[in-house]
Amino acid sequence: MKIKHIFICTLLSLVTTSLAGSCDDDKDDVTIVRDYSEQDNVDVPHKALPDFAYGADPSWVTAMEAADWKFYDTDGQATDCFELLSNTVGVNACRLRVWVNPSNGWCNTNDVVKKAQRAQSAGQNIMIDFHYSDEWADPSKQKKPSIWDDCQSLDEMTDLLYKYTKKVLTALKTNGVDVSWVQIGNETQNGMLETNSDGAATSVSGWMGPDYCKLHNAGAKACKEVYPECLIVVHFQNGQNEAKNINSLEKLKAGGAEYDVFGVSLYPDFTKDTWYEDYIDACMHTLSTVKTTYGKDVMICEVGCTDITTENARIALNDVVYRCQHEVDAKGVFFWEPECYNSWEGYKMGGFLSNGRPSDALIGAFGGRATSRLHD
């Protein structure tokens, strides 16, 4: 019996390790309670949605920590990033991107589960942002994950997307994470899964239209099966471009795409003299039009500003948050990678200062709850 016991323990350990996956320099495996593919009714308490999501997408945080970058509160005390975002900045919601098989491991299922656990422990609601790629999916590229390159038909692609979505969400639920929102694709105004992983043309079309809607609805179906109360988010780029957003939403409507929330990205260009009118005013008009025309909830899934210390950045963040709440009745604003500083990975639109502390502009808009307008 002792030999049998040792064999079973060893087998379970091997299965757990293979399911958890790995990240470079990542020594803490996720504790797998069950196989990702099991659809047991795992008891995960549902967290009520906040009245307004003061959100952040800190998906780079584990890579930064592995590189020994630190985060500090306003007194200069080193602090866990998720606790810092909650307690100092005022964040109550966390958005996390997930890639299928990234070359360095970051943002794979294992990494996302651990970050989601930390964010939830810090009191934040969770949004999962599926890129359906091994890397960035954005307006310039929507590459299939490499393991899907051999897919020969739209039906096969739809099935793969459904199963993958369900597998990732089941991993989160199995490990005690509640999910409030799920993005089916990232900045998909032009479509998704448009090319093979090397960028070569594919016979399986993910361009905006009926094919896109079929793929989208497969992901939405998987989400509702795992998290019946989660909200499905469609996320487009360039929130200031109302005409293009409406054009794509009309195609979603024609194709029968099912979603609960329309979200946009917004990155004001301060080099333009009319940046406020061209970005802030225009985005608010887009969101208002979508609410009125389609009866959908709206939010900003990504916002960021160059040089967070400038007056323009302070005005932009404050007014985006304030106007989303009080003028548009949006459901939230998520700052993209606020924890970045000193041009981490070349990114210069983070919300932290060069000393690793959150900026006054970030705290003022999110922690201060943007109580007054700064722009007339």
Image: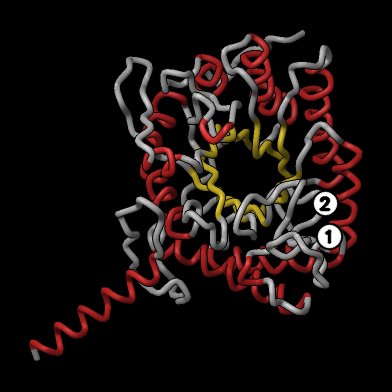
The residue at 70%/23% (across/down) is: 323
Instruction: Name the quarter where the C terminus is drawn.
Output: top right
What percent of the width, then of the height, locates residue 318?
63, 18
Q: Is residue 198 visible to the viewer in this orientation of the structure?
A: yes
Q: Amino acid at mark 1?
A: Trp
Question: Which residue is disc 1 drawn over?
Answer: 207
Does label 2 or label 1 sit earlier along the sequence? 2
**Image check: 152 left or right of 318?**
right
Q: Quadrant of the N terminus?
A: bottom left
| Residue 265 x %, y % | 71, 37
Q: Nearer the viewer, residue 362 or 135?
A: 135
Instruction: Check contact, mark 2 vs mark 1: CB within 8 A.
Output: yes
The colour scheme applied to this rendered structure is secondary structure
Q: Residues within 10 Å of mark 2 (few under 14, many from 20)?
A: many
**Who's the residue at 41% across and 60% down the image?**
44
Identify the element where label 1 is drawn: loop
Comparing 228 with 54, the one in front is: 54
Residue 264 lies, with reference to residue 314, above or below; the image says below
Residue farthest left in this picture: 2
Q: Does residue 45 appear in the picture of this structure?
A: no
The residue type indicated by label 2 comes to Asn
Does 51 sit left or right of 238 as displayed? left
How many numbered marks does the figure carry?
A: 2
Looking at the rendered structure, the secondary structure element under dot 2 is: loop
* Snapshot quadrant of residue 217: bottom right
Query: Residue drawn at (71%, 29%), measured in percent from left and top?
Result: 267
The image position of residue 188, as x and y in percent, is: 76, 51
Question: What distance separates the C-alpha of mark 2 from that of mark 1?
Answer: 6 Å
Residue 175, position as x, y percentages in the image: 38, 61
Q: Count neighbours of disc 1 (C-alpha within 10 A) and say few if under 14, some if 14 to 19, many if 20 or more.
A: some
Please report the residue visible at 50 percent of the width from the left and 24 percent of the height from the top: 342
Q: Which residue is mark 2?
A: 190
